[in-house]
Image (cartoon, helix red, strand yellow):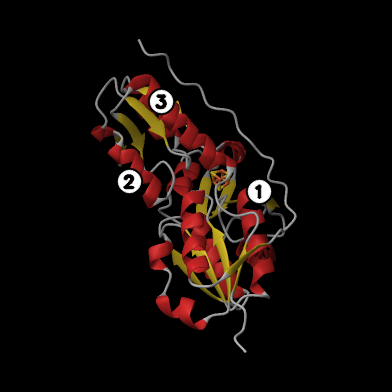
Amino acid sequence: MNQEKRVFLASPHGMCAGVRRALETVEMVLDRFGPPVYVLHEIVHNNFIVNDLQQRGVRFAETLEEVPPGAVLLFSAHGVSAAVEEQARSRNLRIVDVTCPLVKRLHHCAGKARDVLILIGHRGHPEVEGTVGRSGAKYTFVVGSTAEAEALTPLPPGSRIELLAQTTLNTEEVGRIEAKLRERYPQLESAATVCYATTNRQRAVRALAGKCEVILIIGSPRSSNSNRLREVAEQAGVKAFLIENAGEIPAEIIAKTATIGVSAGASAPESLVEGVLERLRAAGFRVENENCAADESTAFSIPPIPEKS
Ligand code: SF4
């Protein structure tokens, strides 16, 4: 007898409050000013969203020099350093800051550090660059792994050390790095800065791992939280794939797997999730909704948008 083919959809999955706010804001800015509207870096790390906005007149700049004076400029949800903010303000730009409030909280904690700040994160990610550029500490270090924690330059005895983490990291990996650092510096003071959306989505993927042969994570390759979801699934012992859309589901997985888990990163739109489920339904899978109890009631208000003069 054929085994029933089932898909388990993680809950919660997909868009978080910070991404929804960023996208609602860019829509309002486009309505008010019309194209072109500029965004420093990708507004969120999702190719589908970025391509759609580009077609509607949003231009993504890598540096402030690419933005003409007087233009409307949004800072992305990942935030920017104090120096970049200051430079943008001095260029007579109309700025709309859609930095996620939870990234702002991380900036605030970094700004309060005075002696040593250790930020657990991935070098080169805009959120890490922005947070390092908000540090008030004499010495700031970025640590990306337990090996880097072990290799960290010895700090002067008695240093006051603040420990923070990028909002979208693997919570278990953050715990391991913190434990390694604490062996060397028991006086560490840490604040929990991995955000609610990251934590909830990872917990839901771990809960799926016991009942699926394969887990599909919908998200773009540059999305930190989507990559971490794939890692979390693999660390829980399940083969996992990061896919951008339904067209990227490996044909072999559809043909040879009876139980598939599906989740999506915090920047992936629900239409892409629906597309994946549709393709799996068409291949004979029955979709079941999982429910991992989590508080997802967080919502953020729209940031100030300048008037059109
Ligand atoms: S993943 Fe977390 S920190 Fe990033 S935008 Fe969403 S809520 Fe904000």
Residue 303: % across, % down: 52, 26
At 55% from the left and 47% from the top, the residue drawn is: 15
Q: CA distance from mark 3 to mark 1?
A: 27 Å
- Quadrant placement of the C terminus: top left
Q: Nearer the viewer, mark 1 or mark 2?
A: 2
Total number of numbered discs in the rendering? 3
Query: Pointer 3: residues within 10 angstroms few (<14), some, or many (20+)?
Result: many
| Sooner in the amino-acid sequence: mark 3 or mark 1 | 3
Position of 16 relative to 87 (above/below): below
Asked whether residue 153 appears in the rendered view, the answer is: no
Position of 123 relative to 208 (above/below): above
Residue wearing tag 3: 29
Residue wearing tag 1: 196
- Quadrant placement of the N terminus: bottom right
Does mark 3's beta carbon lie closer than 8 Å to ligand 1?
no
- Residue 96 versus residue 295: which sits nearer the camera? 295
- Residue 211 versus residue 63: which sits nearer the camera? 211
Element assignment for label 1: helix
In this picture, residue 281 sits left or right of residue 43: right
